[in-house]
Image (cartoon, rainbow, N blue to C red):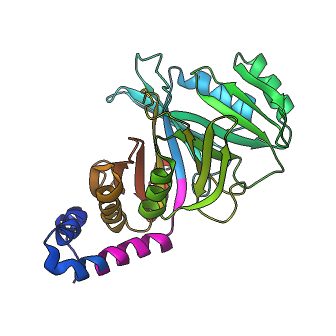
Protein backbone atom coordinates (compact mmCIF):
# COMPACT_ATOMS: atom_id res chain seq x y z
CA UNK A 1 0.00 0.00 0.00
CA UNK A 2 1.37 3.43 -0.91
CA UNK A 3 1.94 5.71 2.08
CA UNK A 4 0.17 9.05 2.22
CA UNK A 5 2.21 12.23 2.62
CA UNK A 6 0.99 12.51 6.19
CA UNK A 7 2.21 8.99 6.96
CA UNK A 8 5.53 9.65 5.23
CA UNK A 9 6.09 12.77 7.27
CA UNK A 10 5.95 10.84 10.52
CA UNK A 11 7.59 7.67 9.21
CA UNK A 12 10.77 8.07 11.30
CA UNK A 13 8.71 8.67 14.44
CA UNK A 14 6.58 5.61 13.75
CA UNK A 15 9.71 3.54 13.24
CA UNK A 16 11.19 4.82 16.47
CA UNK A 17 8.02 3.99 18.39
CA UNK A 18 8.53 0.36 17.39
CA UNK A 19 11.93 0.35 19.04
CA UNK A 20 10.54 1.76 22.25
CA UNK A 21 7.59 -0.61 22.74
CA UNK A 22 9.24 -2.93 25.25
CA UNK A 23 11.65 -5.78 25.82
CA UNK A 24 9.12 -8.38 24.59
CA UNK A 25 9.61 -7.02 21.08
CA UNK A 26 13.40 -6.86 21.24
CA UNK A 27 13.95 -9.40 18.46
CA UNK A 28 11.62 -7.60 16.05
CA UNK A 29 13.16 -4.25 16.96
CA UNK A 30 16.65 -5.49 16.17
CA UNK A 31 15.59 -6.87 12.79
CA UNK A 32 13.93 -3.59 11.75
CA UNK A 33 16.86 -1.54 13.03
CA UNK A 34 19.37 -3.72 11.18
CA UNK A 35 17.33 -3.49 7.96
CA UNK A 36 17.22 0.31 8.05
CA UNK A 37 20.91 0.71 8.80
CA UNK A 38 21.80 -1.84 6.12
CA UNK A 39 19.68 0.12 3.64
CA UNK A 40 21.69 3.27 4.45
CA UNK A 41 24.91 1.52 3.39
CA UNK A 42 23.46 0.84 -0.06
CA UNK A 43 21.67 4.15 -0.55
CA UNK A 44 22.72 6.43 -3.42
CA UNK A 45 24.49 9.29 -1.63
CA UNK A 46 26.32 12.28 -3.06
CA UNK A 47 27.73 15.50 -1.61
CA UNK A 48 25.55 18.24 -3.11
CA UNK A 49 26.61 21.55 -1.59
CA UNK A 50 27.85 23.43 1.43
CA UNK A 51 26.02 26.60 2.45
CA UNK A 52 27.84 29.61 3.90
CA UNK A 53 26.81 33.19 4.71
CA UNK A 54 28.84 36.06 3.27
CA UNK A 55 28.91 39.82 3.88
CA UNK A 56 29.40 40.86 0.25
CA UNK A 57 28.00 38.46 -2.33
CA UNK A 58 29.43 40.01 -5.50
CA UNK A 59 32.89 40.45 -4.02
CA UNK A 60 32.93 36.85 -2.78
CA UNK A 61 31.80 35.50 -6.14
CA UNK A 62 34.51 37.47 -7.96
CA UNK A 63 37.14 36.36 -5.45
CA UNK A 64 36.28 32.69 -5.92
CA UNK A 65 36.22 33.08 -9.70
CA UNK A 66 39.46 35.05 -10.02
CA UNK A 67 41.51 33.28 -7.35
CA UNK A 68 40.22 29.70 -7.42
CA UNK A 69 38.85 29.42 -10.93
CA UNK A 70 35.31 28.59 -9.83
CA UNK A 71 32.33 29.24 -12.08
CA UNK A 72 29.22 31.22 -11.19
CA UNK A 73 26.52 28.62 -11.79
CA UNK A 74 23.51 30.68 -10.72
CA UNK A 75 22.62 33.85 -8.84
CA UNK A 76 19.23 35.03 -7.64
CA UNK A 77 17.80 37.79 -5.49
CA UNK A 78 14.85 37.36 -3.11
CA UNK A 79 13.85 40.93 -2.18
CA UNK A 80 10.71 39.91 -0.28
CA UNK A 81 12.77 37.62 1.97
CA UNK A 82 15.64 40.17 1.99
CA UNK A 83 18.43 37.88 0.87
CA UNK A 84 20.37 36.85 -2.23
CA UNK A 85 22.20 33.65 -3.09
CA UNK A 86 24.77 32.46 -5.59
CA UNK A 87 25.98 28.97 -6.50
CA UNK A 88 29.66 28.60 -7.39
CA UNK A 89 31.74 25.54 -8.17
CA UNK A 90 34.06 23.74 -10.55
CA UNK A 91 31.31 22.09 -12.59
CA UNK A 92 27.53 21.70 -12.93
CA UNK A 93 25.43 21.26 -9.81
CA UNK A 94 24.02 18.08 -11.32
CA UNK A 95 27.37 16.34 -10.91
CA UNK A 96 29.64 18.42 -8.65
CA UNK A 97 29.95 19.40 -5.01
CA UNK A 98 29.36 23.17 -4.98
CA UNK A 99 29.18 26.15 -2.62
CA UNK A 100 25.96 28.05 -1.99
CA UNK A 101 26.64 31.61 -0.85
CA UNK A 102 23.94 33.46 1.10
CA UNK A 103 23.86 37.23 1.55
CA UNK A 104 21.30 38.58 4.01
CA UNK A 105 20.45 42.23 3.41
CA UNK A 106 22.33 44.55 5.74
CA UNK A 107 24.53 41.90 7.37
CA UNK A 108 28.16 42.52 6.45
CA UNK A 109 30.03 40.30 8.91
CA UNK A 110 29.67 36.86 10.45
CA UNK A 111 31.60 34.86 13.02
CA UNK A 112 33.16 31.75 11.50
CA UNK A 113 33.78 30.13 14.89
CA UNK A 114 36.06 27.15 15.53
CA UNK A 115 33.70 24.18 15.00
CA UNK A 116 33.95 24.47 11.21
CA UNK A 117 37.58 24.65 10.11
CA UNK A 118 38.10 25.00 6.34
CA UNK A 119 37.36 23.92 2.80
CA UNK A 120 39.95 21.94 0.84
CA UNK A 121 40.68 22.73 -2.82
CA UNK A 122 42.96 20.73 -5.14
CA UNK A 123 45.13 22.31 -7.86
CA UNK A 124 47.91 21.10 -10.13
CA UNK A 125 50.04 24.07 -8.99
CA UNK A 126 49.04 26.04 -5.89
CA UNK A 127 51.78 28.71 -6.11
CA UNK A 128 50.02 30.91 -8.71
CA UNK A 129 46.74 30.43 -6.84
CA UNK A 130 48.34 31.76 -3.66
CA UNK A 131 49.64 34.81 -5.52
CA UNK A 132 46.19 35.52 -6.94
CA UNK A 133 44.75 35.35 -3.42
CA UNK A 134 47.44 37.73 -2.18
CA UNK A 135 46.81 40.23 -4.98
CA UNK A 136 43.03 40.06 -4.46
CA UNK A 137 43.32 41.02 -0.80
CA UNK A 138 43.07 37.58 0.75
CA UNK A 139 45.21 36.52 3.68
CA UNK A 140 47.92 33.85 3.40
CA UNK A 141 47.90 32.11 6.76
CA UNK A 142 50.33 29.34 5.72
CA UNK A 143 52.71 29.96 2.82
CA UNK A 144 52.90 27.19 0.19
CA UNK A 145 55.36 24.39 0.75
CA UNK A 146 55.76 20.82 1.95
CA UNK A 147 56.40 21.89 5.55
CA UNK A 148 58.46 18.82 6.36
CA UNK A 149 56.15 16.33 4.66
CA UNK A 150 55.42 15.19 1.13
CA UNK A 151 52.17 17.06 0.47
CA UNK A 152 52.60 20.62 -0.84
CA UNK A 153 49.87 22.83 0.61
CA UNK A 154 48.96 26.33 1.77
CA UNK A 155 46.21 27.93 3.81
CA UNK A 156 44.48 31.15 2.80
CA UNK A 157 41.53 33.19 4.08
CA UNK A 158 38.94 34.76 1.80
CA UNK A 159 37.53 38.28 2.50
CA UNK A 160 34.84 36.75 4.76
CA UNK A 161 37.36 34.96 6.95
CA UNK A 162 36.68 31.48 5.57
CA UNK A 163 39.80 29.32 5.49
CA UNK A 164 40.79 27.31 2.41
CA UNK A 165 43.43 24.60 2.32
CA UNK A 166 45.08 24.57 -1.12
CA UNK A 167 46.47 21.13 -1.98
CA UNK A 168 48.90 20.53 -4.83
CA UNK A 169 47.74 17.35 -6.55
CA UNK A 170 47.11 15.95 -10.01
CA UNK A 171 43.77 17.05 -11.51
CA UNK A 172 40.72 15.30 -10.06
CA UNK A 173 37.00 15.22 -10.94
CA UNK A 174 36.17 17.18 -7.79
CA UNK A 175 38.59 20.07 -7.06
CA UNK A 176 36.37 21.06 -4.10
CA UNK A 177 37.70 18.12 -2.17
CA UNK A 178 36.65 18.42 1.46
CA UNK A 179 35.57 20.46 4.43
CA UNK A 180 36.82 19.98 7.97
CA UNK A 181 34.74 19.76 11.14
CA UNK A 182 36.31 19.78 14.61
CA UNK A 183 34.86 17.08 16.89
CA UNK A 184 35.03 16.30 20.59
CA UNK A 185 35.04 12.50 20.19
CA UNK A 186 36.47 11.15 16.94
CA UNK A 187 35.31 7.55 17.36
CA UNK A 188 31.77 8.72 18.11
CA UNK A 189 31.78 11.07 15.11
CA UNK A 190 33.07 8.34 12.78
CA UNK A 191 30.45 5.90 14.02
CA UNK A 192 27.70 8.48 13.52
CA UNK A 193 28.59 9.25 9.91
CA UNK A 194 29.07 5.57 9.12
CA UNK A 195 25.72 4.48 10.57
CA UNK A 196 23.54 7.51 9.83
CA UNK A 197 24.89 8.38 6.38
CA UNK A 198 26.59 5.23 5.14
CA UNK A 199 30.03 6.83 4.88
CA UNK A 200 33.31 4.96 5.02
CA UNK A 201 36.61 5.85 6.68
CA UNK A 202 38.93 6.46 3.74
CA UNK A 203 41.90 7.67 5.79
CA UNK A 204 42.77 7.94 9.46
CA UNK A 205 45.91 9.62 10.71
CA UNK A 206 47.23 10.33 14.21
CA UNK A 207 49.85 12.99 14.92
CA UNK A 208 50.95 12.71 18.55
CA UNK A 209 53.60 15.41 18.13
CA UNK A 210 50.93 17.88 16.97
CA UNK A 211 48.32 16.42 19.30
CA UNK A 212 45.54 15.69 16.83
CA UNK A 213 43.90 12.82 14.95
CA UNK A 214 41.98 13.12 11.70
CA UNK A 215 39.66 10.85 9.75
CA UNK A 216 38.47 11.34 6.17
CA UNK A 217 34.94 9.97 5.77
CA UNK A 218 32.91 9.86 2.60
CA UNK A 219 31.73 7.77 -0.33
CA UNK A 220 33.72 5.95 -2.96
CA UNK A 221 37.14 4.41 -2.36
CA UNK A 222 39.56 7.36 -2.64
CA UNK A 223 39.56 10.48 -0.48
CA UNK A 224 41.43 12.40 -3.19
CA UNK A 225 39.09 11.58 -6.09
CA UNK A 226 35.77 12.33 -4.36
CA UNK A 227 34.55 14.86 -1.75
CA UNK A 228 34.93 13.93 1.91
CA UNK A 229 34.44 15.30 5.40
CA UNK A 230 37.64 15.67 7.36
CA UNK A 231 36.87 15.05 11.04
CA UNK A 232 39.55 16.34 13.40
CA UNK A 233 40.01 15.59 17.08
CA UNK A 234 42.43 17.85 18.94
CA UNK A 235 43.80 16.19 22.06
CA UNK A 236 41.88 17.19 25.20
CA UNK A 237 39.68 19.74 23.38
CA UNK A 238 35.98 19.06 23.86
CA UNK A 239 34.31 22.41 23.10
CA UNK A 240 34.23 24.62 20.00
CA UNK A 241 32.38 27.78 19.06
CA UNK A 242 29.73 27.31 16.39
CA UNK A 243 29.73 30.82 14.92
CA UNK A 244 26.99 31.91 12.52
CA UNK A 245 28.80 31.89 9.16
CA UNK A 246 28.89 28.23 8.10
CA UNK A 247 25.34 26.88 7.77
CA UNK A 248 25.32 23.24 6.66
CA UNK A 249 26.27 20.63 4.09
CA UNK A 250 23.67 18.93 1.89
CA UNK A 251 23.85 15.28 0.85
CA UNK A 252 21.66 13.50 -1.66
CA UNK A 253 19.62 10.40 -0.83
CA UNK A 254 17.17 8.21 -2.72
CA UNK A 255 14.63 8.35 0.13
CA UNK A 256 14.54 11.11 2.74
CA UNK A 257 11.97 9.26 4.84
CA UNK A 258 14.07 6.13 5.27
CA UNK A 259 17.16 8.28 5.75
CA UNK A 260 15.43 10.27 8.50
CA UNK A 261 14.39 7.03 10.18
CA UNK A 262 18.00 5.84 10.17
CA UNK A 263 19.28 9.15 11.52
CA UNK A 264 16.64 9.11 14.26
CA UNK A 265 17.81 5.65 15.30
CA UNK A 266 21.47 6.57 15.35
CA UNK A 267 20.85 9.74 17.38
CA UNK A 268 19.28 7.57 20.08
CA UNK A 269 22.60 5.76 20.41
CA UNK A 270 25.21 8.44 19.69
CA UNK A 271 23.52 11.82 20.17
CA UNK A 272 22.33 14.53 17.83
CA UNK A 273 18.75 15.21 16.74
CA UNK A 274 16.50 15.71 13.76
CA UNK A 275 15.67 19.42 13.44
CA UNK A 276 13.46 19.22 10.35
CA UNK A 277 11.20 16.17 9.87
CA UNK A 278 11.23 14.69 6.37
CA UNK A 279 8.85 16.18 3.86
CA UNK A 280 8.56 18.55 0.90
CA UNK A 281 9.87 22.09 1.05
CA UNK A 282 6.71 24.26 1.02
CA UNK A 283 8.16 26.54 -1.68
CA UNK A 284 10.05 24.20 -4.03
CA UNK A 285 8.41 20.86 -3.24
CA UNK A 286 11.85 19.26 -2.85
CA UNK A 287 11.74 16.51 -0.20
CA UNK A 288 14.33 16.96 2.53
CA UNK A 289 15.16 16.47 6.17
CA UNK A 290 17.87 17.96 8.39
CA UNK A 291 19.64 16.99 11.59
CA UNK A 292 22.45 17.87 13.98
CA UNK A 293 25.27 15.39 14.55
CA UNK A 294 26.53 14.68 18.10
CA UNK A 295 28.76 17.78 17.94
CA UNK A 296 25.90 20.02 16.77
CA UNK A 297 26.95 20.27 13.09
CA UNK A 298 24.01 20.47 10.70
CA UNK A 299 23.45 18.28 7.63
CA UNK A 300 20.54 18.42 5.19
CA UNK A 301 19.48 15.30 3.30
CA UNK A 302 17.83 16.01 -0.07
CA UNK A 303 15.94 13.71 -2.42
CA UNK A 304 18.22 13.08 -5.42
CA UNK A 305 15.52 13.32 -8.09
CA UNK A 306 13.90 16.39 -6.54
CA UNK A 307 17.29 18.10 -6.38
CA UNK A 308 17.80 17.67 -10.12
CA UNK A 309 14.26 18.90 -10.84
CA UNK A 310 14.84 21.98 -8.69
CA UNK A 311 18.05 22.80 -10.57
CA UNK A 312 16.23 22.44 -13.89
CA UNK A 313 13.32 24.62 -12.72
CA UNK A 314 15.67 27.32 -11.45
CA UNK A 315 17.38 27.39 -14.82
CA UNK A 316 14.18 28.14 -16.69
Relative horizontal placement of residue 173, taking residue 241 as reference (left or right): right
Q: Within the magenta stretch, is there residue 43? A: yes
Q: From where the camera sits, is residue 307 visible? A: no
Where is residue 262 shown, x and y percent of the image? 35, 65
Relative horizontal placement of residue 249, taking residue 99 as reference (left or right): left
Q: Within the magenta stretch, is there residue 254? A: no
Task: Tell me the quadrant of the picture where the N terminus can be found.
Answer: bottom left
Q: Residue at x 53, y 62 (%)?
A: 199
Q: Residue at x 43, y 32 (%)?
A: 239
Q: Is residue 92 above or below residue 242?
A: below
Q: From where the camera sits, is residue 225 visible? A: yes
Q: Residue at x 21, y 70 (%)?
A: 19
Magenta stretch, main secondary structure, is helix
Q: Quadrant of residue 98?
A: top right
Q: Is 246 or 303 nearer to us in this picture?
A: 246
Report the magenta residues as a range. 31-47
Q: Is 160 or 81 nearer to us in this picture?
A: 160
Q: Residue at x 41, y 61 (%)?
A: 196
Amino acid sequence: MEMTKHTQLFFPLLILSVFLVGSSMAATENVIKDDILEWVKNDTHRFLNAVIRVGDLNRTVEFYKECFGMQLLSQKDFPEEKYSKAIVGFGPQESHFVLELIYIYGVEKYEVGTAWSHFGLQFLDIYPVVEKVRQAGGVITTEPGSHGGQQVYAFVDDPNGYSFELLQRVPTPEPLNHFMLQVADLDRAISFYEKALGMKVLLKYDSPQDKFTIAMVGYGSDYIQSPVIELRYNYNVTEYTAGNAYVHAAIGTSDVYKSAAAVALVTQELGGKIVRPPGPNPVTGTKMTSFLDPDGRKTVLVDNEDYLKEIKNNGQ
